Amino acid sequence: MGRKRAREIWYLNRKYSAKKAEALGLVNEVVPHAELRARTEAMCEELKKRGPQALAALKAAFHARHNGVFGMSRVTIDHLVANYYHTDEAKEMGRSFNERQDPNPEKFYR
């Protein structure tokens, strides 16, 4: 949605039908109320087939893109904690720093 349309929506605060909201891109899909639970469960089943870590990474990347510097900082920290701190490389670098020694690359380049 472009900025002009977004401003119109924000400034005028109009009420939109479900079909109009779908046409504007405000909602992804419109289903009859009687089918809502079944459609939601079907979507959840589809998401369950995706890897949870992959979905988390995609979610983080999306938020990083749309939250500026804070978002980029957050995704970087999350990546370090989840993917780096527990590696052999991180352990060796931490050990060498604490002991004021050069790291042993054979411990993480295999």
Image (cartoon, grey):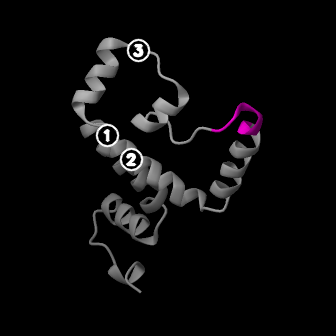
Q: Amino acid at mark 2?
A: Phe
Q: Up-down: is 13 above or below 19? A: above
| Residue 98, quarter of picture | bottom left
Percent of width and height locating residue 19: 52, 33
Q: CA distance from mark 1 to mark 3?
A: 25 Å
Q: Up-down: is 96 above or below 69? A: below
Residue 14's disc number: 3
Q: Nearer the viewer, residue 64 or 25?
A: 25
- Helix, strand or loop at label 1? It is helix
Q: Going 40% across and 78% down the picture, which residue do you hit?
A: 108
Q: Going 55% across and 58% down the picture, which residue do you hit?
A: 53
Answer yes or no: do the residues labelled 3 and 2 have beta carbons within 8 Å? Answer: no
What stretch of residues is rendered in magenta? 31-36
Specify which label sits upstream in the sequence, 3 or 2.
3
Q: Going 51% across and 52% down the picture, which residue do you hit?
A: 56
Q: Which residue is mark 2?
A: 62
Q: Which residue is mark 1?
A: 66
